[in-house]
Image (cartoon, grey):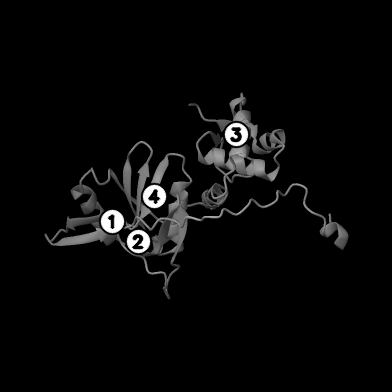
Amino acid sequence: MITNLEEYLKPNPWLRPPRPTPELWAPPEPSRGLRDVPLVSRGSSHGHIVLDDCWLDFESRLERNVALSFLARPDTARVVEQTPRVVYRDDDGEWHEHVFDLYVTRRDGVKSAVFVKPSALLRPAHRRMLELIAAQMSPQIAQMVLIVTEKKLDRAALYNAELIQEVGRDPDPDDDAAIAGLISGMTGPLKIDDLVEASGLHGYGFRAVVRAIAAGKVRLTKLGMIDRSAVIERVPE
């Protein structure tokens, strides 16, 4: 507990000095989406995040959260917003065009067209539209059509997704290698805190463990928030 100003001003012994700033900086690539998202809106939260050195635009906080949740899964290879654009015929025989909110590609190649909507605004007409699209869409475009509302995102999953996104923006190869070495010696479930203590890397070790979870090298033994008390186990190769 800090009791005086002198103690408060002492340097944190576990905090590393900032890394040198590179002389050259490469800006992120443009969005891969097929539809531009206006960044100014009076009725919803519009914005963008950088994922895999590429802009990803979102039209609502729910879209942002869903995108992060997919990207937190080790089996996800890529998430693109405002894609794919499909044409379908309705029950009256009229043709329509629809652009999905997210396009998710898994590492095994399976593609999903994702429709994101708050549960309060989800209508039977939306479900019927998606049924028609799923029946008419070429499997080369997507093999699954998914509906995602806020009810599919629990507090722990969203917390983990945001944590994984945060630590992934500043990887450290040496820290990751140190944690990978400890993981290779795991013979059973282990608390994250035990792995961090064994590494001697303190908070940086925790960040490396989170990156190992994101990479699918270890996993939580039960659903919950990723914190130092969580128990993890190796993922069989």
| Residue in the image at 32% along x and 44% along y | 111
Q: Amino acid at mark 4?
A: Val
Q: Are marks 2 and 1 in contact (CB under 8 Å)?
A: yes
Q: Earlier in the sequence, mark 4 or mark 1?
A: 4
The answer to whether residue 5 of the structure is visible from this angle is: yes
On the rendered image, what quadrant is the N terminus found in?
Answer: bottom right
> In percent of the image, x 48 and y 46: which residue is there?
72
Q: Which residue is mark 1?
A: 127
Kindly report which numbered mark, 3 or 2, lies closer to the viewer in this rendering: 3
Q: Which residue is mark 3?
A: 177
Q: Is 137 on the left-hand or right-hand side of 223?
A: left
- The residue labelled by disc 2 is 122
Q: What residue did someone put label 4 on?
A: 79
The amino acid type found where label 3 is placed reads Ala
Marking on residue 16:
none
* Amino acid type of the residue that numbered disc 2 sits on in the rendered structure: Leu
- Percent x, y of residue 104: 36, 47
Could you say which is closer to the camera, residue 79 or residue 120? 79
